[in-house]
């Protein structure tokens, strides 16, 4: 039986936008306020976005309230672009399936044209 990959159901960019919205609302806000500020409806797709941002570790959710995470706040306060990129890399690799793939292929130049096949293969092992 193929193993189930637990990956974010929204793009990294969209998750960063959600975290930035929460930050702009004083670093914490209820989900409905965040959705409205982003021009979205409080729906299943918005919940998937919040879940993805949580998987990356950009925000936390407690009883319907969203909070920016410590690592997101540190990334935003980076002194240099290099430091910011290191934080972004760490945030991206918070997702276990992404971290596993990175660890497996970090010493190999992975051609972009086979990345989708590698992801499918990882899900079957």
Image (tube, rainbow, N blue to C red):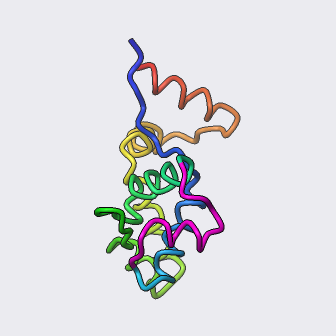
Residue ID at (51%, 83%)? 24
Q: Please state the horizontal and vertical placement of residue 123, each as a whole percent of the image.
A: 46, 25
Picture layout, residue 12 above or below residue 67: above
Tally the numbered discs.
0
User: What residue is drawn where x is 43% and y is 85%?
Assistant: 26
Where does the C terminus fall, quadrant-wise?
A: top left
Whether 121 is drawn above or below 6: the answer is: above
Provide residue 15's location: percent of width, then percent of height: 53, 61
Closer to us: 124 or 51: 51
Closer to us: 8 or 84? 8
Q: Is 97 left, or right, of 62 in this rendering?
A: right
Magenta span: 28-43
Q: Position of residue 86 (x, y in %)?
A: 44, 68
Q: Residue at x 60, y 59 (%)?
A: 41
Position of 23 with respect to 43 (left or right) is left
The quadrant in which residue 72 appears is bottom left
Q: Residue furthest top?
A: 1
In the image, is residue 31 above or below residue 3? below
Say if the magenta span includes residue 106: no
């Amino acid at each position: 039986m193929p193993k189930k990959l637990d990956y974010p159901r929204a793009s990294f960019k969209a998750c960063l936008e959600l975290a930035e919205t929460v930050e702009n609302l004083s670093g914490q806000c209820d989900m409905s306020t965040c959705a409205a500020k982003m021009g979205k409806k409080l729906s299943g797709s918005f919940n998937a976005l919040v879940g993805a941002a949580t998987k990356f570790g950009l925000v936390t959710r407690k009883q319907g309230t969203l909070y920016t995470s410590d690592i997101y706040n540190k990334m935003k306060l980076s002194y240099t672009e290099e430091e910011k990129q290191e934080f972004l890399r760490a945030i991206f690799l918070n997702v276990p399936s992404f971290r596993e793939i990175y660890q497996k292929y970090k010493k190999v130049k992975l051609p972009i044209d086979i990345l989708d096949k590698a992801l499918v293969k990882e899900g079957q092992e």
